[in-house]
Structure formats: structure tokens, C-alpha cells
């Protein structure tokens, strides 16, 4: 057995020295020191020896195993260092190579439109007011003269979370909450934000979109003030030569209500395919704040009045930049978005 041990030790040490990588080294370890290896087998056979031979052979087996283990660990350290060096050489960086150009990003077209409109109205003395996208039914509808069961609610069918909680269909709840908080004080705000409706997505409709609403409340606020404000908006967004016209309409929260058209930027009003030969393009809805809305917010409708308007940011962007499908704004297609890198003002 002693001779067999020495032979196993010499074989193991020779194979350890010959191992060229960590995998081969592990194979040697398993072959000689594993549960089924010859050295382990010798340890298991110690019970067959006589009591006199057992201590001597046990010590010899342990000495061989410890020597092989020590040589294994030493060889592993060498091979690990070699492996790390090889990896570093493969992954080395040539610092003389020119750097990769990082393409500079740009603002999304909708962001640009919203910022342009915000800048205009801030310069006119408006404040920017924001609210939550999850809203109460009361502020989204009832406080805006749309009681439960009102047929006009069908035009703004939305996503309900509970019977009294929903995803807002417009940013008008911000106006209702602002009027309630101001307790009769004058107001001049715009409220931009994301809104939701249960529309079928197509080239001109989306179940979510950006809206910017405006509200002015105070003494002697007239329809002429509204028209002058919207005329300034049209000229800012589409050019100084643009004109607007107001057409009668209906909204539950304004009275009287109007649809607002801008003269076609392509044909100048003479008629073309963009304006469907009319010379005009509809851009937003507006009107004088309904007395019921003022009263519910704590204002005296006999002493104060106001106007409100609602702008779809996508609608303005589509007309301003000639976009033919609203879905382009939300698909994150760089082929579409990269066009605006060249048109940044």
C-alpha cells in the first residue's frame, strides 16, 4: 500500500504540473481527490488493516493527500493569474482610437409645442397649474356642469377605476380645483397635462393625448378678451399672418361656446387639400365660463365672469410640423423623431 501511495502521489503531481488551464486542473483534482478517487478509496480501506499498521498508513495517506492538495492550490493560483492576464490582453483598450460620437438628443415635438405655448402665456401673466391624472368624478364632470347621467358625458367616455374615481378626460379638473381653492379671487392659469378617453386609436385619435387648457376669471372678462388671446396664440404657433374665426358650438361648461378655426397655413385661406377647400382648420374649443361652474366653485356669477379654452397639443403639432398620423408621437420611432433634430429653433 505504501508503494501504491507513492506512485499515486507522483502521478498526481505530474498531471498537476502538466495542467494548462483551470478546467484540466479541476479534472485532476476530481480524478485523485474526489469521492471516487484512489486516495479516497485508500482511506476507506483503512479498516481492513491491522491495528498496528493502521496509524502508520493513515498518517502516510494524509501526508500524500495534503501534499497533492497543496500543489493543487499552488498550481491553481498560477493558472488563475495567467487566465486573468490573458483576459486583460484580450479586453485591452486602444486609447489611440478616436472616440465614438454620441448623438445629441433633442426635445420631443410635443414637448416643444407645450413649452412654446407655456412661454407665450407666462409672458401674458398666466400661471401654470398642474393636477393628477387620476381624478374624482366630481371634479372631472359634476363641478363642470356635467351631473351624473348627463348625455354630454358620452363624448368623454373614459376609464373608471371605481364609480367615483377615473382617469381624467381633460385638464379641466385643475381649473375646478383652482377656482375652489382661490375662493373668489381672480384667476389666470393654463393647465397642461396628459388626458385619457376611450377612443379607438387611428390617424387622428388616441386613447391618451396631451391637452393644454386655459382659464381666466375676474371682473369684466368678455368674449373679446378670449378672441384676442386666441388670436395671439394662433400667430405665435402658426405665423403672424394667420387669422382666426369663431363658430358657435356647445360645451356644458361654457356658455356661449365656440369652435376656433385658424386660416390654413398651406394655402393662406384660398382652399386646398389640407383645409378641405374651406381655407380654415379647426384647432380648439373655447367659450365663456358657464355661470353654474362659477357658482359651484364659490364665485358670484353676477359680479365676475371668465373664459376657458382647451388645446390639443398633438393637434397643434400635427399642423405645425405637417404630421399626418397622431400615433407617430407615441411609437418612439427614431426615423420620425430624428426629423426634429434638424428643425430645432
Image: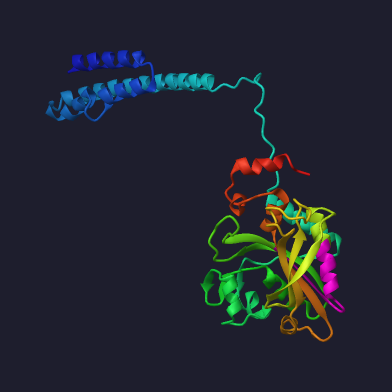
Image position, residue 306 (x, y; %): 80, 76
* 215 falls in the magenta region: yes
Q: Residue at x 34, y 13 (%)?
A: 18
Give the quarter of the image for residue 113.
Answer: bottom right
Image position, residue 276 (x, y; %): 68, 57
Left or right placement of residue 90 versus residue 225 in this view: left
From the viewer's side, name the closer residue of 132 and 46: 132
Q: Can you say whether 305 is above or below 275 in the image?
A: below
The tally of labels here is 0
Q: In what quadrant of the picture does the N terminus appear?
A: top left
* 61 falls in the magenta region: no
Left or right placement of residue 44 versus residue 10 in this view: left
Q: Can you say whether 212 is above or below 302 in the image?
A: above
Left or right placement of residue 225 versus residue 2 in this view: right
Image position, residue 264 (x, y; %): 75, 55
Image position, residue 46 (x, y; %): 17, 28
Q: Can you say whether 263 is above or below 163 in the image?
A: above
From the viewer's side, name the closer residue of 99 and 283: 283
Q: Is residue 121 at all visible to an observer of this figure?
A: no
Residue extending farthest to the right is 220
Q: How did the renderer colour the structure?
A: rainbow
Q: Residue at x 77, y 55 (%)?
A: 270
From the viewer's side, name the closer residue of 241 and 16: 241
Give the quarter of the image for residue 155.
Answer: bottom right
Give the quarter of the image for residue 148.
Answer: bottom right
Q: Is residue 197 at all visible to an observer of this figure?
A: yes
Q: Can you say whether 77 is above or below 108 in the image?
A: above
Q: Which residues are magenta?
A: 212-231
Q: In what quadrant of the picture does the C terminus appear?
A: top right
Amino acid at each position: 500500500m505504501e508503494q501504491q501511495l507513492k506512485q499515486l502521489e507522483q502521478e498526481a503531481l505530474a498531471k498537476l504540473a502538466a495542467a494548462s488551464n483551470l478546467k484540466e486542473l479541476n479534472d485532476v483534482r476530481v480524478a485523485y481527490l474526489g469521492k471516487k478517487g484512489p486516495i479516497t478509496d485508500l482511506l476507506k480501506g483503512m479498516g481492513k488493516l491491522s491495528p498496528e499498521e493502521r496509524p502508520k498508513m493513515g498518517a502516510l495517506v494524509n501526508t500524500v493527500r495534503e501534499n497533492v492538495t497543496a500543489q493543487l492550490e499552488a498550481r491553481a493560483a498560477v493558472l488563475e493569474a495567467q487566465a486573468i492576464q490573458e483576459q486583460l490582453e484580450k479586453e485591452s483598450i486602444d486609447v489611440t482610437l478616436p472616440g465614438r460620437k454620441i448623438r445629441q438628443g433633442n426635445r420631443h415635438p410635443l414637448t416643444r409645442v407645450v413649452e412654446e405655448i407655456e412661454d407665450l402665456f407666462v409672458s401674458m401673466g398666466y400661471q401654470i397649474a398642474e393636477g393628477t391624472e387620476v381624478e374624482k368624478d366630481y371634479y372631472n364632470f359634476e363641478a363642470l356642469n356635467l351631473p351624473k347621467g348627463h348625455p354630454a358625458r358620452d363624448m368623454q367616455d373614459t376609464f373608471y377605476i371605481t364609480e367615483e374615481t377615473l382617469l381624467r378626460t381633460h385638464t379641466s379638473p385643475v381649473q375646478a380645483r383652482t377656482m375652489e381653492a382661490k375662493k373668489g379671487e381672480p384667476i389666470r392659469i393654463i393647465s397642461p397635462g396628459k388626458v385619457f378617453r376611450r377612443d379607438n386609436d387611428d390617424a387622428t385619435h388616441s386613447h391618451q393625448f396631451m391637452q393644454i387648457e386655459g382659464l381666466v376669471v375676474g371682473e369684466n372678462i368678455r368674449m373679446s378678451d378670449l378672441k384676442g388671446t386666441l388670436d395671439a396664440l394662433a400667430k405665435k404657433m402658426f405665423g403672424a399672418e394667420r387669422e382666426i374665426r369663431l363658430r358657435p358650438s356647445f360645451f356644458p361648461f361654457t356658455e356661449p361656446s365656440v369652435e376656433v378655426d385658424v386660416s390654413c397655413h398651406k394655402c393662406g385661406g384660398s382652399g386646398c387639400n389640407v383645409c378641405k377647400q374651406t381655407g380654415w382648420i379647426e384647432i380648439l374649443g373655447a367659450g365663456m365660463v358657464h355661470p353654474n361652474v362659477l357658482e359651484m366653485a364659490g364665485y358670484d356669477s353676477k359680479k365676475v365672469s371668465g373664459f376657458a379654452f382647451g388645446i390639443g397639443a398633438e393637434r397643434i403639432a400635427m399642423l405645425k410640423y405637417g404630421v399626418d398620423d397622431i400615433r407617430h408621437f407615441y411609437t418612439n420611432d427614431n426615423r420620425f423623431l430624428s426629423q426634429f433634430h434638424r428643425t430645432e429653433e
